[in-house]
Image (spheres, coloured by chain):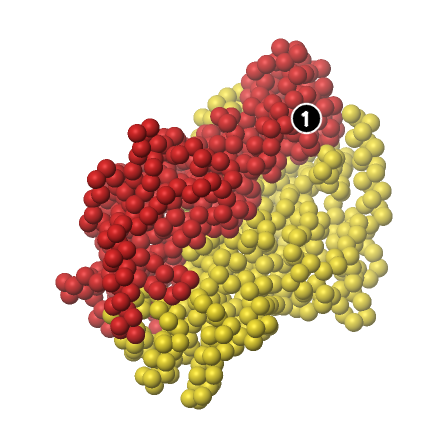
Chain colours: A red, B yellow
């Protein structure tokens, strides 16, 4: 038996076919270096750009990944590996990642088809890690991309990520908090994530606090006793307006009040007027309750008076896309000194061959104009490369980046986006094209593969 | 700093407001026992029933939950707790769960509004664990409920869960594999989950295996060399029909072939004919590629000849619902010997008060007829109670259940469902009503709360 304790560095968190292929490569003496690229096939229909996130977890994994003795034994006993020779299991016992990685830094804006991670390593290593790399980067990139939209909709008001209870388990909640913070959220309700990543923690009181007392006023009073400067009082357990009248009647100014249901545009306007009337202009009106970017925009359109937003489900399990169509594809094989570019040609799912780089071009205004996906060996004039080397021989080239650096990069990147892309509805797409050399190479590889058929 | 290593038992995986309320209860001397119930407000629009899952992880958590010293220190240093007295931090250091739990066993069919977990404990304990209990049970119940539909659509053909790379991180993939297995999936591609839970692991080869070789035939041959009895060969890297002709031409019979894109109904019929013609009737046709229950049903309608299905995204991140609207609500407070039932009355989100039980009634056919949600103290004639005691004084009442027991329970439960509920589209709902005593209690609590306003 195993537990989740070694989950972070376990090479066993993979699909079985990665292990069968590994055994196949080893046992048939297929000794090659391979390059894989990780990218998104297309943007989810509502999104005009993506925010790269999850690289730090991917690198932590690559630095520490290994099989425990028990894990190797588990594989050895699987009937699937009945005909596999002992050298494979010895190989697994020694398995470490020794390759090189280039990546787009976290917080960067990226688009469909642009590689955000490129791994070059002995083919077994590069292949075996696919599942985990995808799971880490796919999820955080999806969340960061959604969170950026929510933050845009909030027009400068703080957005706090509230999703832990709605996340796909404990780990997902923690990384959703991280990705949301990169994308501009002010903080999280998730205390574990707050400690792990240094993200500010926010929290007030739940309906159960109010319900536990016989009397709502008493519930407010007792909370103010313990949190005299910090209390945000929840108004909608029974009746929002009656509750605010009680708060005002007691004369003890809270830090804020929270609405979690009902007509929040109307109630927030009304609450703001009541609070301002008695000079409580600095009492925050905090709003939560199944919010997303569209609901936030609608609240503003209806004149809502809101100081800050709490957003849960939309930041942990977005409905607009269940996941990004992120894939990890073999693009090059180097064997016996010969390099051969690889591509998949099936009708609906073909891919471009070759080691690639993304070059970004800016206009005179400083706003970005277009991207070109090119071969790594190209260097188109004026294009800024997005992928940077982050790992060599299985070691990082720089210490882990502080999370606020990624967050600042994201804020800065969004300023460079053509403004139409910040729309919450689909905008004319940002221009991304493949270089002429890359298109020529694709034709060559196509011809070579067709000839071999 | 912390890491994910202690994630399974860390009480810090909570929302900050659970901690502020805990401090509030302790410091104001609010010494009460509370009962909370966890339930789903309504079924996702497409689903006619749910399969309970995730209880085992919830119980493991309740048995081991605690704060490490570092975690307590982290809370103490948060400015939010500036006015909180030292006794609270001492309390956290000693914190354990000491309460009692009743629950619907995993693999059971449940419906909206039916409590699937009921916690009675000192109010701080019962409250603090909310976030984690929801995250565990909400996610696995969502996945199991979807997987049951996929298994129904597959009409007895094995379904293998393939979602690790599309899951919301590593942990989510593992628990999705578990929940899918409870709901009737035959296995998983996730090797970590296979080892942790004893779920059969399945896997073949990826497109990259084919692409790594110069020649597709050579790629098939090398795989058959290593896995002579087990190889399932992937046909759609370049051209499905050309690939199958190569396999047949070599004359080495694989265990199966796999289609992952293209017109899988037509290709599977064609492949079956080719295989049967040469007497390879036992060669399995395995199909994968963004499948869900509707696509599987459509494949059968088009006469697809499929031996087994691999399903990824739909089993780890369902699109039909981002999460269940699962909540954990205070229903009763016992303080100084007095019991007071609690309810939330806000317009859109009111809840029923009181400790509840669910009673299920069967018809003469053995099929279930209706459920009644009643007070725990009721015992309507002929009704079988669904919630059973699973924990007392913070200890389990029985050792962990084997996963196959939950899986068998699920298979058995589905046999008792009125057949219309097995439809993949919405059916007339299964009748669930609240007992007269419960409705009377709700009126009483409403009056009491309105009077107090």
Query: In this orientation, which residue lies closer to the viewer: B248 or B333?
Result: B248
Number of numbered discs on residues: 1
The image shows residue A123 at horizontal and vertical percentages of 26, 61
Q: Secondary structure at mark 1?
A: helix
* Quarter the N terminus of chain A occupies: bottom left
**Is residue B316 something one can see in this rendering?**
yes
Q: Is residue A239 above or below residue A37?
A: above
Q: Residue furthest left?
A: A337
Q: Which residue is mark 1?
A: A266
* Quarter the C terminus of chain A occupies: bottom left
The image shows residue A314 at horizontal and vertical percentages of 54, 41
The image shows residue B83 at horizontal and vertical percentages of 53, 20
Query: In this orientation, which residue lies closer to the viewer: B128 or A23?
Result: A23
Query: In this orientation, which residue lies closer to the viewer: B43 or A83?
Result: B43
Q: Is residue B80 above or below residue A251?
A: below
Left or right of B224 in this view: B392: right
Quarter of the image where one finds residue B212: bottom left
Left or right of B160 in this view: B153: right
Q: Residue at image x 40%, y 73%?
A: B240
Q: Is residue A322 above or below residue B18?
A: below
Quarter of the image where one finds residue A282: top right
Q: Is residue A405 above or below residue A374?
A: above
The image shows residue B131 at horizontal and vertical percentages of 56, 41
Q: Residue at image x 67%, y 33%?
A: A261
Left or right of A26 in this view: B430: right
Q: Residue at image x 76%, y 38%?
A: B341
Q: Residue at image x 21%, y 63%?
A: A340
Chain letter behind tag 1: A
How many C-alpha atoms fall within 10 Å of the one at disc 1: few (<14), some, or many (≥20)? Answer: some
Quarter of the image where one finds residue B344: top right
**Is residue B140 something one can see in this rendering?**
no
């Amino acid at each position: 038996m195993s537990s989740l304790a070694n989950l972070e560095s376990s090479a066993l968190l993979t699909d079985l076919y990665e292990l069968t292929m590994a055994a196949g490569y080893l046992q048939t003496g297929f000794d090659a270096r391979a390059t894989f690229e990780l990218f998104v096939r297309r943007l989810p229909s509502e999104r005009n750009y993506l925010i790269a996130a999850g690289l730090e977890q991917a690198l932590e994994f690559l630095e520490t990944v290994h099989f425990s003795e028990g894990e190797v034994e588990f594989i050895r006993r699987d009937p699937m590996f009945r005909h596999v020779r002992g050298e494979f299991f010895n190989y697994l016992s020694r398995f470490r990642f020794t390759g090189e990685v280039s990546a787009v830094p976290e917080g960067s804006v990226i688009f469909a088809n642009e590689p955000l991670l490129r791994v070059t390593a002995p083919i077994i290593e590069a292949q075996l890690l696919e599942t985990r790399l995808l799971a880490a980067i796919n999820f955080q990139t999806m969340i960061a991309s959604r969170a950026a939209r929510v933050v845009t909709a909030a027009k400068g008001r703080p957005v706090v990520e509230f999703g832990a209870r709605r996340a796909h388990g404990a780990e997902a909640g923690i990384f959703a908090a991280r990705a949301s913070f990169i994308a501009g959220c002010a903080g999280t309700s998730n205390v574990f994530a707050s400690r792990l990543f240094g993200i500010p923690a926010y929290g007030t009181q739940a309906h159960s606090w109010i319900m536990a007392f016989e009397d709502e006023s008493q519930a407010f009073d007792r909370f103010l006793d313990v949190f005299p400067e910090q209390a945000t009082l929840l108004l909608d357990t029974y009746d929002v307006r009656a509750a605010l009248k009680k708060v005002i009647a007691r004369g003890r100014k809270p830090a804020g009040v929270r609405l979690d249901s009902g007509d929040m545009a109307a109630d927030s306007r009304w609450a703001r007027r009541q609070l301002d009337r008695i000079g409580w202009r600095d009492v925050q009106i905090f709003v939560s309750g199944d919010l997303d970017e569209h609901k936030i925009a609608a609240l503003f359109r209806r004149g809502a008076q809101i100081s800050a937003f709490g957003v849960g489900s939309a930041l942990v399990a977005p409905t607009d896309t269940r996941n990004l169509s992120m894939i990890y594809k073999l693009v090059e094989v180097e064997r016996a000194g010969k390099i051969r570019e690889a591509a998949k040609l099936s009708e609906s799912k073909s891919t471009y061959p070759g080691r690639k780089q993304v070059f970004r071009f800016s206009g005179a205004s400083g706003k970005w104009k277009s991207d070109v996906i090119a071969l790594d060996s190209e260097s188109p004039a004026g294009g800024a490369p997005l992928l940077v080397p982050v790992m060599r021989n299985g070691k990082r080239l720089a210490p882990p980046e502080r999370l606020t650096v990624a967050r600042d990069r994201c804020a800065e990147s969004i300023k460079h986006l053509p403004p139409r892309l910040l729309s919450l509805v689909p905008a004319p797409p940002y221009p991304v094209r493949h270089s002429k050399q890359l298109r020529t190479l694709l034709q060559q590889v196509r011809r070579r593969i067709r000839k071999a058929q």
